[in-house]
Image (tube, helix red, strand yellow):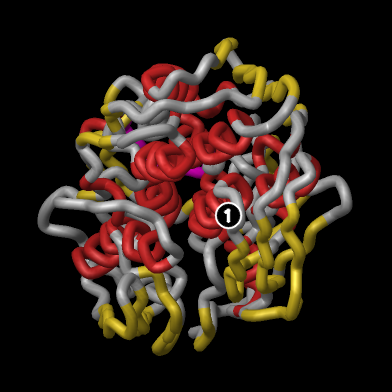
Amino acid sequence: MLGAIANGVTVAHNWLDAGVTARMVDCIRDLGIEVEVAPTDPGKATLTVHGQGLYGLTAPKDPLFCGGSATTMRLLMGLLATQPFTSVLDGHAGLRRRPMERIAQPLRRMGATVETTDGHAPITITGARLAAIDYDMPVASAQLQTALLLAALGAKGQMTLRQPGPARDHTLRMLKGQGADITESKQGDITFNPETFDLKPLNFTVPGDMSSAAFLMTAALIVPGSEVVIEGVNTNYTRAGLLEMLQAMGGQVELHSEQMQAGEPVADLQVKAGPLHDVEVSGEAVVRMIDEFPIFTVAALQATGKTVVRDAAELRLKESDRIAVVVEEFSKLGAKIVSHPDGYEIDGPQPLVGATVRSHKDHRLAMSLAVAGLVAAGQTIIEDAQELNESFPGFVETLQDLGAEMEWSE
C-alpha cells in the first residue's frame, strides 16, 4: 500500500505470499496499480509495486474484498479517505463482525464520508481533501494509528496522535524510510507533517514475522528434547511480548546475530525444550502479543503454577471470540481454563488428550491446536483447517521437517 502511493517502483524481498497479503494485493490492483508477485520459495516472493503517488489511484469498479483481513480493511479505510471517489470495502463473515467505528469516527472528523453497517463492514467511503486533527487514540492500536497516518497524507495541517500505550510501529519506521517528517515523544505522541515531503519508493527485505515464529518457539519449548534455531526474526519491542513472556516463564530462548534490517531489529532465536512456570500477562504486554494468545495458551497449559491473563478483552473481537473458542476447543483436549470477560487463568501443567477439534476458521487457533496436538496423548484432528495457509504458508511442512507426525489434506 505504501508502495502504491510512492513516486516510483518499490521492491520488497522475502515478502509473505499468503492469504492475508494476497487480499491487499488484490485491492491495490483493483485501485489501478500494477503489482508483480514473483515466487521465490514456498510462501515467499519478491513483491514489485509500480507506485503512482497519492492521487494516482483509480476508482474500483466493484467492492474491494478484504477476505478475513481486518488489517487490509482498516488500513485501506485511511487511504481511501484521501481519494476523490467512492469505494466500498467488504469481507467474509468473520471480518464483518469486527468493529470498524474506531477507524471511521476520526476519519469523519477529518472530513471523509464513511458509512458503516451498524459499525461493521460493508463500509462505503467517499474521500475528500481532509483536515489534520489532534486526536487522543482510545486504544493503543497500530491499525488505527496507520489508518490515520495514511489519511493525514491527504490532509492540510499538522497531525498529532496521542497513544495510551505502545503499539506496533512498523508503519512509522517505513514512512520515515520513505522520507516522512514524523516525530515521536517519550509519552508516545506522534506528530506528522505530511505537506513537507513526497513518499519515496523502497527496496528492502522483510524480516521474519514474530507471529509465525511464535508457533515454532512454543513447539520447541514444550516437546521434550527439542532444539530449534529460527533465523532472521523481527524482534521489534512492540512485537516481542510473547518472546518476553516465554522467557519470563523460564523458557530457554536466546537471541543471536542481532542486527538491523529495513529499519527493524532482527535476530536468530535459539530455542531449547525445558520446564516452564506460571506468569501473569496484563497491561501493555497484552498489546505487544495480542495475536499470540492462542499459542501462549498452549505454553501455559504445560507450565507449572497458575498463569493469569488480564486486560485482554480485545481478544473477543478477533476473527473469532478468541477467549471463548480457546476455552471451547482446548477443553476438548482435556484442558481446564477459567475464562473472565477480559482474560482467563490456567492451573498447570495439564495433560492433554487427542480429540477432534475445530478451527472456527481462525488461522492462529488452528495452528495453536496443531502445536497442542504434538504433546497430547493420541491423535488430534483439526476440522475446517483450510485457514492454515492464511498467514503461515508451509506451516505443516515446516513442522514435518522438524520431526512432527502431522498430515494435512485440503
Looking at the picture, tell me which residue is in the foreground, 299 or 6. 299
Query: Label 1: which residue?
Result: 220
Q: In this view, does 107 lie to the left or right of 189?
A: left
Q: Is residue 20 left or right of residue 65?
A: right
Residue 231 in percent (x, y) is at: 59, 74
Residue 155 in view: no
Residue 190 in percent (x, y) is at: 74, 53
* Mark 1 burial class by Cα count in 10 Å: few <14, some 14-19, many 20+: many
Residue 116 in view: yes
- The answer to if 383 sits in the magenta stretch is no
Q: Which residue is drawn at 59% across and 79% down?
A: 178
Q: Residue at x 67, y 58 (%)?
A: 272
Q: Residue furthest left?
A: 61
Residue 284 in percent (x, y) is at: 75, 36
Q: In this view, does 36 lie to the left or right of 211?
A: left
Q: Give the range drawn in magenta.
A: 109-116
Secondary structure at numbered mark 1: helix
Q: Is residue 283 above or below residue 259?
A: above
Q: Is residue 317 above or below residue 370?
A: above
Q: Residue at x 42, y 33 (%)?
A: 377
Q: Residue type at mark 1: give it.
A: Ala
Q: Which residue lies furthest to the right in this view?
A: 186
Residue 345 falls in image quadrant: top right
Looking at the picture, tell me which residue is in the foreground, 29 or 81. 29
Question: Which quarter of the rendered picture does the N terminus lie within?
Answer: bottom left
Q: Which residue is drawn at 88% across and 52% down?
A: 186
